Amino acid sequence: MQHHRSRRKTVLVSSGKKTLLVPDKDADGLSSGAILRHTLLLLGLPKEQIEVHLLSKGNNVFDDVERARMLAYDPDYVFVIDQGSRSGPPIIDKPHVGLVIDHHFATEADFPKNSDHVSACHSPPVATSSLLTYLICEPLHDKVRSECDWLAVVGAHGDLGNTLKWEPPFPSMHDTFKKYTKKLLNDIVSLVNAPRRTATYDVISAWDALATTDVPSSVLKSPRLLAARQEVNAEVERCTHAAPKFSADGKVAVFRIRSESQVHPVIATRWAGHLQSKALEIVMVANEGYVPDKVNFSCRIARCARGRDIAVDIIQSLKGYAAMSDPTMGEAEPTDVDAEKRPLIARLGDNFARGHVQASGGIVGVEEFEELMRVMQVGIKVDKPGSEGKSPAKKKAGVIDAKQKNTLAGYFARA
């Protein structure tokens, strides 16, 4: 039903009214936007009637400043793609037709007022936003498959990895891999993801390279994308050697870095594949230098925790920690200010614990993040029950066994 409604809206767009595309900044989001743009052009919408809005660094589509910028385009149709979702006012403050295409975790209530949506988050295996967009658009014109199939692969591999098996219920991409090698498409993923991770955050260079070409190999020749990837690789190498500290329960490893580049998700993914322990479940990388006065953090499930009897849900784990009390407060009476302070989980805001149950994160204030670290008791060793904080008693020097009868003195006396 969601697909049918979204197709009707996509066809309506071809009537010639101004359309705004708002794709996310990564390979999946940009590929989704490119698929939709190609489809609208095939359906006859003039190129000058299609606008794209790319969010500023550190912002989300629900921020007032971004809503105002989207409104400035004066669109009749707005497509919000791969941005995650939450409940709130309409996408923009004017009459419009809005459609959200997404796969991040959300409830039926987590969408803007008066918008329609297509979401895959409750339909495992969860399709990416690019796959959803492709499946919506493919029946609308007989050239969508031949012109956009590679974009669907780039987006899916960007989010699900290049070892993805294209088996039902996912569409067959057998013909696509006959036309284009997996190496080519995976290299495109790497290059397209690079600009949004740089300190300059020039996502527009990735969009221009991806959305305006009919020849996938041309993406690999973009000087800016190549330079961006080199810059990101160097920054990842600089930051990846930070030492982790663990939560008191041993379930979360926390790496803290400071970088103007968005390298925290890459480092989290890297360490999630290497760290091992019986208790470890989540790897968190917190970046204190990405946006002023904020901590941006990314969490990934540790590889050693996958396949355990109880599946790890990062979103619920983060919310569980945030709901705990600060152990450093003890039983002391709160001050008037503290008494009026809202619970930590409320103060962390709507940008906390967003994304997927397997790959989550957030953007929170510095003070709130430090409180979360205290609640989790990161870097604090907690004594085991019964130890009472004491070290094991040492035996007296020289005494091996008080009951031992055969001594060296006795041996020589008998000789």
Image (cartoon, rainbow, N blue to C red):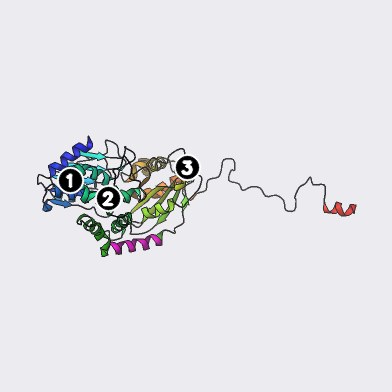
Check contact, mark 1 vs mark 3: CB within 8 A: no
Q: Tell whether 62 sits left or right of 327.
A: left
Along the horizontal axis of the image, is 388 left or right of 5?
right
Residue 58, placed above or below residue 101? below
Query: Where is residue 330 shown, x and y percent of the image?
Result: 47, 42
413 relative to 118 in the view: left or right: right
Asked whether the beta carbons under mark 1 and mark 2 sit within 8 Å of each other, the answer is: no
Kindly report the distance in space between the C-alpha atoms of the residues bearing marks 1 and 2: 15 Å
Residue topped by disc 3:
330
Residue 176 is marked as 2
The quadrant holding residue 317 is top left
Q: Are marks 3 and 2 in contact (CB under 8 Å)?
A: no
Disc 1 to disc 3, how far (Cα)?
Answer: 67 Å
Magenta stretch in the rendered image: 225-237
* Residue at left offset 34%, top offset 61%: 232
Q: Nearer the viewer, residue 236 or 325?
A: 236
Mark 3 burial class by Cα count in 10 Å: few <14, some 14-19, many 20+: few
Sequence-first tag of 1 and 2: 1
Task: Give the amino acid at mark 2.
Answer: Thr
Residue 141 in the image: x percent, y percent? 16, 45
Residue occupying image coordinates x 30% and y 57%: 184
Q: How many marks?
A: 3
Quarter residue 119 falls in: top left
Q: Which mark is residue 142?
A: 1
Would you call the spot at circle 2 few (<14 residues within 10 Å), some (14-19), or many (20 or more)?
some
Residue located farthest toward the left when viewing the structure as drawn: 16
Q: Residue 94: percent from the left, percent from the top? A: 13, 43
Q: Main secondary structure of the magenta part?
A: helix
Which quadrant, please, contains the C terminus?
bottom right
Q: Secondary structure at mark 2?
A: helix
Is residue 287 in view from this perspective?
no
